[in-house]
Image (cartoon, coloured by chain):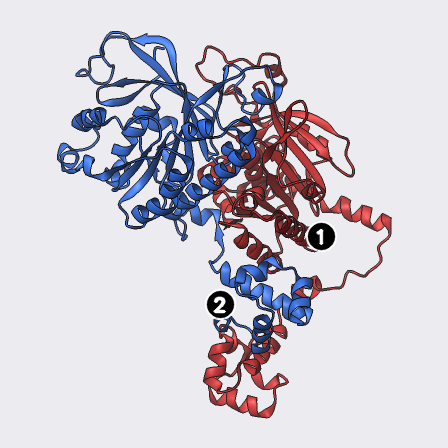
Amino acid sequence: MDWSHLDLNPKVVAAVRRANIQTMKEILCLSGPDLQRLTKLSSSDVQYLHKTVAATIKSDPVVTALQIYNGECPFPTQKRKLSMGCPVVDSLLGGGIPLMGITEIVGESSAGKTQICMQLSLSVQFPCSYGGQDAGAVYICTEDTFPNKRLQELIAFQSMLRTDVPPDVVNNIKFGNNIFIEHVADVESLNHCISKRLPILLSRGLIRLVVIDSIAALFRCEFGVSDSIAKAKYLQKIGAMLHHLSHQFSSPVICINQIADVVNDSHLAQGNFGLLDKKVLPALGVTWSNQLLMRLMVSRTQLCVEGTFPDNKDCILNSGTVLRRMEIIFAPHLPQSFCNYIICKEGVRGIRKVGL
Amino acid sequence: MQRDLGSFPFPPGIRVKLISSGFQSAEDLSGVRATELSKELGISKEEALEILQIVRQERPGEESQLSARLPSARKYTALELLEQEHAQGSIITFCSALDEVLGGGVPVGKIVEVCGAPGIGKTQLSIQLVVDAQIPECFGGLGGESVYIDTEGSFIVDRAMDIAAAAVHHCHLIAESNQDEVQREAAQAFSVSGILSRIYYFRCHDYVELLAQAHLLADFLVAHPKVCIVVIDSIAFPFRHNLDDLSLRTRLLNGLAQQLISMANEHNVAVVLTNQMTTRFGQVQSSLVPALGESWGHAATIRLILRWEGKLRFASLYKSPSQKEATVPYQITSLGFRDVQSSELVSPSLNNGDNPRKRPRNDDDGDRE
């Protein structure tokens, strides 16, 4: 550590070197009296040392909330979000998925989680003016192999889904080239992928979306009931890495989680999530939930939708398309609400609540 | 501030060098760093540092710095302390039930810890408090400024705007119904952009940055004496990952707690910390407890635990030196942190899944006394 570019008295620097303190982090982790003892400096010197080191680490200027709102500050703007590609779902989400933070999509099997993630992997490739990020996505599969055929179908029908985008823009995007697919089979490989491969792709600007489908699969089979503490530690570590990458590169991280049935009437279990009317809980517990910015729950309803799609006469639904529901469980900027959607050949389409 | 350098107690040789290099007054030395000064004047770095320290300490206009450094060895009687506590005031939460339980609101000069599971409303309460701290005095607020230290990235400015707009609207309604000139003027001056401009936002990405911020906060509070609340949301997040050495964590948290307590006392600010919950494995069943360990539990003066019971949210006062333990219901609406209207307590279920917002859209938002 080169102490000379801090504004410090040379005798202080010498004392610090003598005490074998290597990094600024160590200085901050030592209390005033501890530092005094180690370096034999006076208390005012130690105070000045603390403040100088602190000012070097936190050298950015003060920002007010108004400046954040106006976009006048060094933080990435909060106004931009990643669009889902469907105006109804976007309006539920207040514009789309926030760019920084981990968003979780949880639900029963075949509720549509993978479909939603594939749609996001395509919508991220649109230019920023159309709600995308002008970059690709990494899709990490832990369960089945990646549904490539379905992806090709979605790509073929993108222009039908995204009627807000001029067709030449849609046709210019080489969707397939920008989706990087990784298959990971265990926690170690997931760790490796996140710590080594993702930073490279993100720093080169090739991707601006990370999808993990699903995070639950790895943790539920590798860790037994007695390994809860080890599991929690791993989850925290992975969550922290994803959080850090997401904020550093303004790239949303979407994690798919599974659900678990509520076995007993444990007051504790239900009380955590306010989901009393459901008989299911997200898997992975409160350790994982603490890392999330936003949680969306998707489910199948008992209803079916028939006939033509209200907004688009060209889209004729197969009889008995299952109506699904996307619900916001928690988000710092959105109320708990929901919208219905269906999955058709061009992808996920939300349905407005008119007449339902 | 335009004090001539010749009037400072420098040795004559230094004085000559300063003048010949073009430094005339204290202003000229204000942005200069010691390394630069030592190069320009051709003196050792130690001497340059001493020069700068003398100039900076003797700069006028820093009376607040002097008063803040007054040794607190003065003796106080209990009556004086009581009067001081009454005079300091508290910051309301807009949920009257919770304010009553807290004895008027979040008290200035103390540390309040808010614990709860994800999604329960800790960030919402934090944003509500940084807005409420700015409510003008004629409406019962403190008319101060706020500091928000964000470690998770969950401060979404649009939400802060909504909450601020609701608070402004509330004050307008009160001013209208009371027909008070003072209140009306204050309500005019109380605007959403004004509120946002008085929330100072700091983003800390890990515990080292948070520790650094805590060291810098004392000087910031001196420079901004109107700040009356400091929120750290959340204090648990940076200390719960990448920190395997638990004894280091305990030590750092204790040190941080001490710094915050002394800041709360010296600068008359309320400190609000949000904490996460973790599972404690018991003999029979596991329970959710506040994170960061047992010894952290002693750091805060007041501890609030937020939890779900079915579809309703409850806030429990878990620890307080002066108030009785109690539990009250609350809700989060589009306007922010609010009371639960008593009619809704009876039927908590959703009505035909149309609009799951519990609070019906009507105009009785402003009927809080």
In the image, residue A78 lies at what x, y percent? 39, 42
Task: Write down the chain letter for disc 2.
Answer: A
- Label 2 neighbour load within 10 Å: few <14, some 14-19, many 20+: few
Relative depth, front residue between B319 and A261: A261
User: Which three-letter amino acid code belongs to the residue tagged 2?
Assistant: Met
1 vs 2, front mark: 2
The residue at which mark 1 appears reads as: B265
What is the display colour for chain A? blue
Relative to residue B10, is residue B328 depicted above or below?
Answer: above
The residue at which mark 2 appears reads as: A1
What is the display colour for chain B? red
Secondary element under disc 2, as helix, strand or loop, is loop
Residue B4 visible? The answer is no
Give residue A28's quadrant in the image. Answer: bottom right
Relative depth, front residue between A233 and A101: A233
Picture residue at 52% right of the left edge, 54% below the top: B209
Relative depth, front residue between B257 and B3: B257
